[in-house]
Image: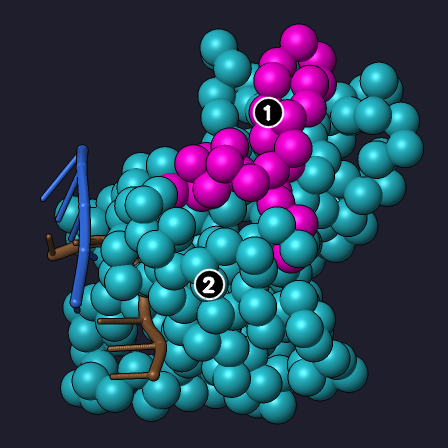
Chain colours: A cyan, B brown, C blue
Amino acid sequence: MITFTFPNEYFSPKATLECGQTFRFSPCGESAWLVLCADKACLLKEYAAEVHVSCEEADEQYFRGYFDLETDYAALLKEAEAFGVPVLFEAVRFGRGLRILNQDKAECLLSFIVSQQNNIPRIKGNLSRLCAALGEKKRFAGYDYYTFPSLERLAERDEDFYRSLGLGYRARYVAASSKKLLEEGFSSVEGKTGAELKRALTAYPGIGNKVADCISLFAFRETAAFPVDTWIARLYRENFGGAETDREKINRFFVEKFGPNAGIFQQYLFYYKRERGDAAV
DNA sequence: CAGGTC
DNA sequence: TCTGG
């Protein structure tokens, strides 16, 4: 096991983990979290001025990439503030240290199918049962955890099995998309970006525009992808005086307004609106 | 009612 | 349209 550090000025484990982009993490006492992705695990510990990341030696580069540590968030926050939009200014202040993760593609795809019309505690429960049932048991830093299941294991189960884990009507989508992933992998999205990537992702069963934007942003580094959910739609009405109700139109409104990094700013806005829905701006 | 999709 | 906080 090795430990590397990163200044916490632009890395807040709490904001990064709790903003809703991932569901596979658990607090370990005060200011520490066990974070899981694919078949890997790491431990985050927050100190006064830095975050310590502990993982297997072979996984260091993986987690540096996972936590997006090569990206300059100081510049991104400056860019966000320069728009002069009060609610965005407050959101980046509130969510300071939030970083967009670079997640495993298959895990992200299936996780966000599970996330639709769902709440975070239940999504976490669904995914943890899914991993316990089909994943591989491993141990890291004294903690037992289950890996995200392989596509082989996922694809051999049917809808009824996923329903038994509590996925509800999403069970059909998980079963069908797992099979598609095992058969063709990501061949249909390979080399695609932007709108083409989004369209290709919506070809997987259970993936519509909103979930496709989430997967584009969280697993394909598509920083302009701007997921529009109920919270963003509310933000659009309450903070931007918007009148449109069509979510694709709301999506275009924000992408045109905030440009190529709109998706990153979306995550700050979403986190702020969900945590501080009562705030004046 | 919850970060929708078919 | 599933389901539970």
Q: Nearer the viewer, mark 1 or mark 2?
A: 2
Q: Quadrant of the N terminus of chain A?
A: top right
> What span is colored magenta in the figure?
A126-151
Q: Residue at x 60, y 38 (%)?
A: A135
How many angstroms separate mark 1 from mark 2 (CA)? Answer: 23 Å
Q: Secondary structure at mark 1?
A: strand
Q: Residue furthest right?
A: A58
Number of labels in the image equals 2
The amino acid pointed to by label 2 is Ala
Q: Quadrant of residue A152?
A: bottom right
Mark 1 surroundings: few (<14), some (14-19) or many (≥20) residues within 10 A: many
Q: Position of residue A74 (x, y in %)?
A: 66, 51
Tell me if residue A147 is in the magenta stretch. yes
Same chain letter for marks 1 and 2: yes
Chain hosting mark 1: A
Question: Left of A130 or right of it: where is A120?
Answer: left
- Residue in front for this viewpoint, A164 or A14: A164
Question: Left of A65 or right of it: where is A57?
Answer: right
Q: Position of residue A78 (x, y in %)?
A: 60, 59
Q: Quadrant of the C terminus of chain A?
A: bottom left
Q: Position of residue A256 (x, y in %)?
A: 48, 87
- Residue in front for this viewpoint, A229 or B5: B5
**Does A255 appear above or below A176?**
below
Q: Residue at x 75, y 31 (%)?
A: A6
Answer with mark 1 or mark 2, whichever residue precedes in sequence. Answer: 1
The amino acid pointed to by label 1 is Tyr
Q: Residue at x 67, y 73 (%)?
A: A183
> Does residue A234 show up?
yes
Q: Which residue is identified by label 1?
A: A145
Question: Left of A205 or right of it: where is A3?
Answer: right
**Does A96 appear above or below A181?**
above
